[in-house]
Amino acid sequence: MTRTAAREIAVHFSYELGFTNLSAQALLDDQLTEERFTELAQEDPLYGEFPDEAQLAYIRRLVTGVGDHGYELDLFIERYAIGWRFERIPRVAAAIMRVAMFEILYMPEVPNGAAIDAAVELTRKYEDEKIVSFVNGILGSFVRAEAAEQ
């Protein structure tokens, strides 16, 4: 499994946090099992390979980080989503931006440009081009204003 696939899985689980009363830890404990991946692989080939220990740690760090810092990350999204109310932002795009912003703020080993590029590519997979441009613009403005360039 690639880091890109692990990031996409983390986005899926971060998205799911918005629809459950489970904590990030409880959600991960429920979803990060070989049995669950076997079930999910029937609908999405992304889950065809179970993550190794490093990838599991990466997924856990992203999802628990988004769970722990969700309010802060949403405030950043609102701040840079000029002309958009948060409620209008597609939930998948918001989950992608939360993951990217968490990487930018709390994972210095991930270059800012790599986090943005990965977010844009993921958005391209799930949303139309208008939302792709929107996500790219928000993350670019966010990095210029909030994060030291790596």
Image (cartoon, rainbow, N blue to C red):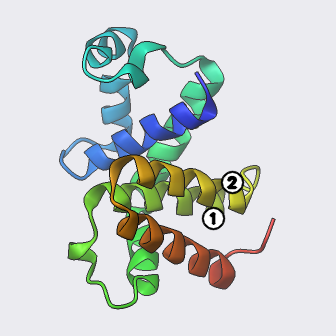
User: Where residue 35 is drawn, which disc sits there?
Assistant: none
Residue under the point 64% across and 85% down: 145
Q: Work out how far the residue at label 1 is from the one at label 2, CA to CA, in angstroms.
A: 13 Å
The amino acid type of the residue labelled 1 equals Leu
Residue under the point 52% across and 57% down: 120
User: Where residue 114 is drawn, which disc sits there?
Assistant: 2
Sooner in the amino-acid sequence: mark 1 or mark 2 = 1
> In this image, 50 relative to 43: left or right?
right
Estimate the x, y position of residue 33 in percent, counting from the top left: 38, 15
Q: Number of callouts in the render?
A: 2
Estimate the x, y position of residue 61 in percent, counting from the top left: 55, 41
Which residue is nearer to you in this view: 124 or 146?
124
> In this image, 88 relative to 132: left or right?
left
The amino acid type of the residue labelled 2 equals Ala
**Residue holding disc 1:** 105
Determine whether 81 is above or below 53 in the image: below
The N terminus: image quadrant: top right
